[in-house]
Image (tube, rainbow, N blue to C red):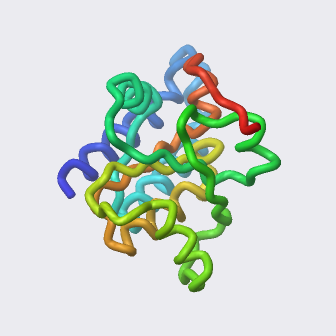
Amino acid sequence: MKTMKSAIFVILAAAIMAGFSFSAQAAWGTKELDTEQSAVAFAREASRGGYNVVTARELKNWIDQKKDMLIVDTMPYEASYKKQHIPGAVQMEFPIPEMTSLDEKTKAALLKILGSNKDRTIVFYCGFVKCTRSHNGALWARKLGYTNVYRFPGGIKAWNEAGFPVAKAD
């Protein structure tokens, strides 16, 4: 839990500092309220979900180190996953609004994808920070007893911005 709180603090700080990436003069009073709203919404989602967070560079390092993990793309297959996804990721679509329940069919599909090792590192991602599909995946993995769950909030947008390779579905 301490790791999650530290990660949330880092993300909040980074989100707030993003407003200062332009000149300090231009940042004052322009979009700080939007940045703050996004940062707080994300922090609250992560707190409710009980999962950890990982950055694009950290995830890329894990992939390069061949860390034993499962990466789950939560975007729609045709609209997103088929066109581009993080190499090695599997796909399971989740809705955007926070899911308060999980039907048996969806639960069975999620358990099948996640596997029986409840301690394996599992990373969920979607399109970008404001997209909450990855929140739903990570939230329900934690509720189902998986212990090493991460959300990659920047999603495929941050992955592309970092210049990291993508794969396409056949």
**Quadrant housing residue 64:** top left
Q: Which of 8 and 84 is in front in this view?
A: 84
> What residue is at 50 percent from the left and 67 percent from the top?
112
Residue 139 position, x and y percent, is 44, 66
Q: Is residue 81 visible?
A: yes
Residue 4's place in the image compared with 65, above or below, is below
Q: Nearer the viewer, residue 135 or 14?
A: 135
Which quadrant is home to the C terminus?
A: top right
Residue 89 position, x and y percent, is 55, 42
**Quadrant housing residue 141:** bottom left
Residue 16 position, x and y percent, is 45, 36
Q: How many marks?
A: 0
Q: Nearer the viewer, residue 85 or 152?
A: 85
> What residue is at 47 percent from the left and 70 percent from the top?
111
Residue placed furthest toward the right: 78
> What residue is at 65 percent from the left and 30 percent from the top?
167
Q: Is residue 25 visible?
A: no
Q: Nearer the viewer, residue 106 or 116?
A: 116
Which quadrant is home to the N terminus?
A: bottom left
